[in-house]
Amino acid sequence: MSSKVKNIQRFALTSTIATYFLIFIGGLVRVSGAGLGCPDWPKCFGRWIPPFSINQIPVGFDATNFNITLAWIEYLNRLAGMITGILILITAILALRNFRTERQILIPASLAAVLVALQGWYGSVVVKSQLMPATVSIHLLLALVIVSLLVYLTYSSYHLSSNTSIIATRPERKLLLILWLISIVQILFGTGIRSSVEMIWSQFPLMAVGDVLDQVGIINYLHTFLGIFLAIGTGIIGLQIKKMDNISPLTKQTILILNILIFIQIFIGINLHLFGLPPILQVFHLWMASLYIGIVLILYTDLKYEQVKNE
Amino acid sequence: MNKQPKLKGLFVSIVVLLVLSILALIVIDMANTSRRDLPILGTVPDFQFTERSGESFANYNMQGKIHIVNFFFTTCVGPCPIMNARVAELYQKYSTTDQVRFVSISVDPKRDSLAVLQKYAKDMGVVDSRWLFLRGEIEEVHRVSEKGFMLAGDLPTIHSTKLILVDKNLKIRGYYDSFDDENLRLLTTHVRELLYGG
């Protein structure tokens, strides 16, 4: 295997893992309420390294809003974001230099690089909007698109080195794309619930969590309904694909993982309701959803290639 | 041969999930603790004022409940109407509990008689004793405002528009700018911490 191929594989995979980790940290920032830990952007209280004590806050910043823990949580999110951004950028440069004719490498790599730069800038919009629900959701949406591109890129790069398969036409792939799209909508519904809960809490700060969820209204039911729909859909598509000829062992595994993930998601969703939205479950609910869409894309890409029998 | 990598994958996923869970729990706990640990900025000074009802109201009457305190005067046309409109919103928000009370102290006792305060309260939509309007000698108000609550200003015309959060033990836990939405959201978070956070 050429070192060029090995390099792009390594960087694509590292970027994907880093982005997943970053989505996890982003969820943590959200539930720990650290989003405004740094009131300015890109610096934090006017400093490249956040203040360690209230005395280090420069003139012009309101010291009453300073919380050292929240500032550092938000700062780590930005730091991880920067490292991930650089990784994606290097991946894109490698793709541009060595794989200009391989569209399945070049396009996702360069698109991811453009979007991650946009995402970095958009971070400032999120902070300036004081975490307006719509901007927070767009921030997440961008992250989901980026990680999807990276998953696709990683899979394609590992296929550069295998010559055992040929390209197949399989109509089921369209269904998977639809599944991916519905999942994105479902995740946005989820963030909508989270925003409504916060909104209701700011209006009725003494309301119990159970009562708040009752007040959220239609979006809550839509999220539950779509969740059940996705679970059934995942099961049916899985069975459909398993019936096909010449599918790879990887395909079988991804179908299994997808079904396990959606089962865990429903289980977490029920527990979120039962136990009054514990933050730790919120983080994993979102993170597992992002894993789910990534694995849907792996399956989608995997079905492009037909396994060659014998050997 | 196929079993080995599968088991390895399962093992790696479980370890990753465990590590992430521990990381998340630590971060969430740190964030919660940091918010709950509101600093103690001072103690409510001794005072004895008169409430609009005519009853006397002293600092020790604040014991056992959370209070949001501010200074104002009824004829103020500058920032006070906005400030007290904000307090009125909070008064509505906390209408289901008697654990959170509001205390507005007049800095213009000459004009703000008890009758004037009663009318003002009525206009603000105050129907119960969850929002108290206090009146005292101007020298006393000076002392309480500057020495006790550490607010600067040339009373009565110039006074602070900050809301002051006082816990159940008469300790001052925070100052909030009544003109800053984000700051007021923080106030409600802090009230919740004081109510439920122990």
Image (spheres, coloured by chain):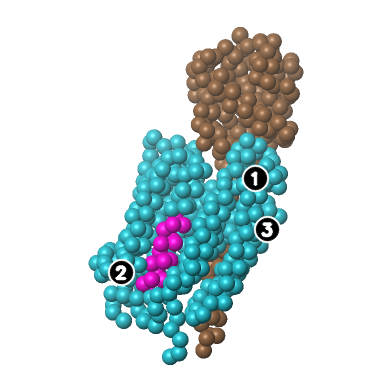
Chain colours: A cyan, B brown
Residue type at numbered disc 1: Ile
Residue type at numbered disc 2: Glu
Mark 1 crowdedness (10 Å alpha carbons): few <14, some 14-19, many ≥20: few
Secondary structure of the residue carrying numbered label 3: helix
Residue B69 spot, x, y in % from top left:
61, 27
User: Toward which corner of the image does residue B67 lie, by quadrant?
Assistant: top right
Q: CA distance from mark 2 to mark 1?
A: 45 Å
Secondary structure of the residue carrying numbered label 1: helix
Q: CA distance from mark 3 to mark 1?
A: 19 Å
Q: Residue furthest bottom?
A: A311
Q: Residue furthest left?
A: A97
User: Toward which corner of the image does residue A84 lie, by quadrant?
Assistant: bottom left
Residue corresponding to mark 1 = A218
Same subunit, labels 3 and 2: the answer reads yes
What residue appears at the point 36 percent right and 72 percent down from the top-left corner?
A157
- Badge 2 vs badge 1, beta-carbon distance below 8 Å: no
Residue B53 spot, x, y in % from top left:
74, 16
* Front in this rendered view, residue A72 or A147: A147
Which numbered circle lies on residue B133? none
Marked residue chain, label 1? A
Quadrant housing the C terminus of chain A = bottom left
Residue type at numbered disc 3: Asn
* Front in this rendered view, residue A191 or B24: A191
Q: Is residue A98 left or right of residue A81?
A: left
What residue appears at the point 61 percent right and 8 percent down from the top-left corner?
B111
Residue corresponding to mark 2 = A102
Which numbered circle lies on residue A271? 3
Q: Residue furthest top?
A: B111
Would residue A149 be counted in the magenta stretch? yes
Q: Nearer the viewer, mark 3 or mark 1?
A: 1
- The stretch of residues the image draws in magenta is A143-158
Marked residue chain, label 3? A
